[in-house]
């Protein structure tokens, strides 16, 4: 028979209260550390002014956003209306979306026309991207590429950090294409492209695939992939016996081509840019 356990010593009310006070004090300190972790810059700009400049409405409207607890500064949720931040250093989120505080940074969507090289300057004298942003003062760079014989959505930006993350394979930003194929594709092709196809430089598989339309002569399909290997969509369908006759990129992450006409650009909207930045961990 096991020896009887000694009776558990019960804490007195005073000890219980003291322990609760200590626990409460620890939580209060942790709360203060999170809420006030070096986010106030006495030489900075009032947060409501920063948000108003970023397009979140009047200063009064921005004060209401702050008071509602919808704003985070450097990872700490803030409600103080007197908070000041340095727009060049602070990382601010509203409703979980990053706010671009640097007004010198811009990101554009371009509908690249057919026959244009994905380069800001082509040494061979072929049509390039420069004429489409000739009216912009910023020094812009294209994010990723589209083949000369492909068309559709291309991003241009002077935000180096955003560009690097969008092109880094770690973040796997999905890209969607509308593809015209030579021949009528069978229903079984969906399973094949979703399962994966072996190419000479490794396997590739689609995240999404659907048939939009098809005739005995050709098929129109929508396909989404999260990688950007050279001519990967064309090589995928060539491998399957359905050569691409037209390729139009319609989406990069949360950014849609929508009704943007060939050769035209537009500046990404506030929420659109914030969602794009969030998709790459910014």
Image (tube, rainbow, N blue to C red):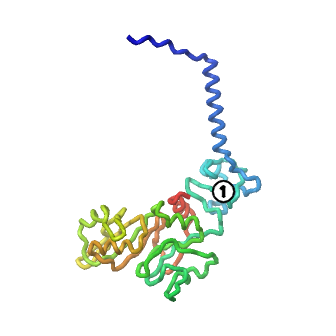
Q: Is residue 145 above or below residue 60?
A: below
Identify the residue shown where x is 61% and y is 17%: 13
Residue sitting nearer the eye, 113 or 243: 243
Residue lying at the far right in this picture: please name it: 43
Residue 68 in view here: no
In this rendering, would 281 be left or right of 222? right
In this rendering, would 236 be left or right of 85? left
Quarter of the image with the N terminus in it: top left
Q: Is residue 79 above or below residue 118?
A: above
Residue lying at the far bottom in this picture: please name it: 125
Quadrant in the rendering for residue 148: bottom left
Tell me residue 5's x, y (percent): 46, 13
Total marks placed: 1
Tell me residue 166's x, y (percent): 51, 65
Tell me residue 117's x, y (percent): 48, 82
Residue 239 in view here: yes
Residue sitting nearer the eye, 12 or 82: 12
Quarter of the image with the C terminus in it: bottom right
Residue sitting nearer the eye, 153 or 62: 153
Identify the residue shown where x is 48% and y is 75%: 260
Crowd class of label 1 (few under 14; some 14 to 19; many from 20; radius 10 Å) = some
Residue hosting label 1: 90
Q: Is residue 248 above or below residue 1?
A: below
Tell me residue 116's x, y (percent): 47, 83
Identify the residue shown where x is 61% and y is 62%: 100
Considering the numbered disc 1 on the image, is that residue within a helix, a strand or a loop?
loop
Quadrant in the rendering for residue 88: bottom right
In this rendering, would 261 be left or right of 220? right
């Amino acid at each position: 028979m096991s020896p009887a356990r000694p009776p558990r010593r019960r804490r007195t009310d005073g000890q219980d209260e003291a322990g609760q006070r200590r626990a409460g004090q620890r939580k209060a300190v942790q709360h203060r550390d999170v809420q006030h972790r070096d986010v106030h810059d006495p030489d900075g700009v009032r947060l409501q002014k920063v948000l108003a400049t970023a397009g979140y409405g009047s200063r009064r409207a921005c004060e209401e956003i702050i008071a509602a607890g919808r704003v985070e500064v450097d990872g700490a949720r803030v409600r103080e209306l007197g908070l000041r931040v340095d727009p060049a250093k602070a990382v601010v989120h509203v409703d979980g979306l990053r706010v671009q505080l640097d007004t010198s940074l811009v990101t554009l969507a371009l509908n690249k026309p057919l026959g244009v090289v994905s380069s800001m300057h082509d040494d061979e004298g072929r049509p390039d991207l420069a004429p489409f942003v000739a009216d912009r003062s910023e020094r812009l760079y294209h994010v990723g590429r589209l083949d000369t014989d492909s068309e559709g959505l291309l991003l241009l930006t002077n935000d180096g950090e955003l560009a690097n993350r969008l092109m880094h394979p770690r973040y796997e930003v999905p890209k969607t294409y509308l593809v015209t194929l030579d021949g009528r594709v069978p229903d079984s092709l969906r399973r094949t492209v979703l399962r994966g196809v072996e190419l000479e430089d490794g396997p590739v598989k689609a995240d999404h695939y659907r048939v939009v339309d098809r005739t005995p002569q050709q098929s129109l399909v929508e396909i989404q992939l999260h990688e950007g290997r050279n001519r990967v969509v064309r090589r995928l369908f060539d491998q399957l016996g359905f050569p691409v006759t037209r390729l139009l990129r319609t989406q990069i992450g949360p950014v849609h081509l929508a009704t943007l006409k060939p050769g035209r650009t537009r500046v990404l909207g506030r929420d659109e840019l914030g969602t794009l930045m969030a998709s790459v961990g910014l």
